[in-house]
Image (cartoon, helix red, strand yellow):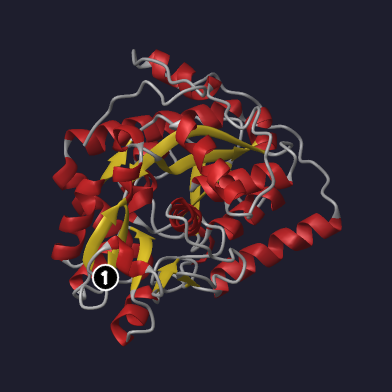
Amino acid sequence: MPPPHQPPRPPRRRRPRRAAALCLLLLACAATSCGYGSKADGPTGGPVPVAAVGEKLSADSVRIGHFPNLTHATALVGVREGLIQRELGGTALKTVTFNAGPAEIEALNAGAVDIGFIGPSPAVNGYVKSKGSNLRIISGAASGGVKLVVNPERIKTLDDLKGRRIATPQLGNTQDVALLNWISARGWKVDAASGRGDVSVVRTDNTITPDAYRSGAVDGAWVPEPTASKLVAEGGRVLLDERDLWPGGRFVITNVIVSQTFLKEHPDVVEAVLRGTVRTNAWINADPDRAKASANAALKSLTGKALEADVIDRAWPGILVTDDPLAASLRAQADHAVTAGLLERPDLTGIHDLGPLNKVLGSLHQPPVTPTGPGTDDQRR
């Protein structure tokens, strides 16, 4: 049942500087092709098949940010199938797509986005930079979906990575931190800022990594799906699946985060979005083939091109959608960033607020999740 109607709050006065920053962020997103391998989709990022119909909640609309990546399958499928909009009733769902976490964090901090799907490293960075004043992780979304793919003619074993050029999506992003931590664990040295060392870490946007691999500019890449499977289609070989580095093969790759201001002002909207994501994850797990097709159709809408069948068929089974934020793995990833010299030891007390999620799970007769351990959600693809 939808929450009882709440009258909208009177609009808040915004400082001119904040409003200007918000406008610049939206203009930048519309102008810079904010999705994976994509054309620009503007602030709405693609059609919502179910119109905003029914009783409006406490906000006229909610703006959700995500990436057009398979690791954001909950957002891709939940939006396309109308599963999130259905829970929102008369409150309109609007989406914005991004290529990288820092830009999405900026949009959340500026008030240009209310809720976001994002990786652990930018979530931690955003929380730390705001000193815990703005962002909260309110749910999990996905685990896995990250691989080290290499040129098999140049690299045959993990030891062969020494002296090679390996791409990651961005300095300090989740995969960049994972590669730097793996290099450090082997006793090799790399300067995190420049990427120079025993392995050359080349920060390359996912949209052009396949071209860089094809041209020989990089010898491999530590990347999320579908980029990893695109490289395999180019003749690359999966040398390491990051799931093999984690207990039980589970680590957070995508979480759901919210502006604390939006959460306080519109808790009914946040709960409605979470009901939509929980139902979406259940829908995906119940019918993975149909969900895979839906996600690919969403990618085509956002980027202008669907993934080839061999690419998505290879990528899809490696991604687990889950409501569990897998909090222990996020804290471990933060420790990895500290070890790499990219982050000072953070105080992550309060980064998770799972009250709204557990309220939703309880209403659906599902067990709660916890922010203090590896989690209890056992949904599996």
Q: Residue at image x 32%, y 38%?
A: 321
What residue does disc 1 label? 231
Identified at 57% across, 67% down, the residue is 29
* Residue 68 higher or lower than 8, as above or below: below
Residue 203 in the image: above or below residue 216:
above
Residue type of the residue flagged with mark 1: Leu
Residue lying at the far bottom of the rendered structure: 215
In the displayed structure image, the side of residue 185 where residue 257 appears, left or right: right
Query: Within the image, what quadrant is residue 281 found in?
Result: top left
- Name the side, left or right, on which 238 lies relative to 310: right
Secondary structure, mark 1, is helix
Q: Where is residue 98 in the image (x, y as percent from the top left)?
A: 50, 61
**102 vs 235: above or below:** above
At 48% from the left and 24% from the top, the residue drawn is 357
Between residue 347 and residue 199, name the one nearer to us.
199
Residue 96 placed where, x, y %? 51, 57
